[in-house]
């Protein structure tokens, strides 16, 4: 059970990482003369994906804690 959840969390983390890299590359490739809303929107999206990394990390830490608690019961 714990292994399946951990594998799912890792899969979500990989998807977030790919999304983060794609957004970062698109943001870097845009010319500076683009409408001001586009870079701001991409920066916001990039920050949201980065926050998702933090949530995945917290989830993995909590999962590991529950696993250790069950092992030492």
Image (tube, rainbow, N blue to C red):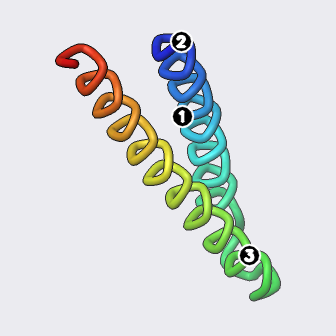
Label 2 crowding class (10 Å Cα cut-off): few <14, some 14-19, many 20+? Answer: few
Residue sitting farthest toward the front: 73
- Whole-number angstrom distance, CA of label 3 to CA of label 2: 38 Å
Label 3 crowding class (10 Å Cα cut-off): few <14, some 14-19, many 20+? Answer: few
Which image quarter is the C terminus in?
A: top left
* Circle 1/circle 3 CB separation < 8 Å: no
- Whole-number angstrom distance, CA of label 2 to CA of label 1: 19 Å
- Return the disc, 1 or 3, that comes first in the chain's sequence: 1
Residue topped by disc 1:
13
* Circle 3/circle 2 CB separation < 8 Å: no
Residue 67, position in %: x, y?
A: 33, 22
- Return the disc, 3 or 2, that comes first in the chain's sequence: 2
| Left or right: 52, with 27 as reference point | left
What residue is rendered at 58% in x and 48% in y? 20
Residue 72, position in %: x, y?
A: 17, 18
**Front position among marks 1 and 3:** 1
- Whole-number angstrom distance, CA of label 1 to CA of label 3: 22 Å
What residue is rendered at 25% in x and 27% in y? 69
């Amino acid at each position: 059970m714990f292994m399946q959840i951990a594998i799912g969390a890792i899969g979500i983390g990989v998807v977030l990482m790919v999304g983060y890299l794609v957004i970062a590359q698109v943001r870097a490739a845009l010319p500076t003369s683009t409408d001001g809303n586009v870079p701001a929107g991409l920066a916001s999206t990039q920050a949201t994906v980065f926050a998702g990394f933090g949530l995945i990390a917290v989830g993995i830490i909590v999962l590991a804690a529950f696993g250790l608690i069950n092992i030492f019961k």
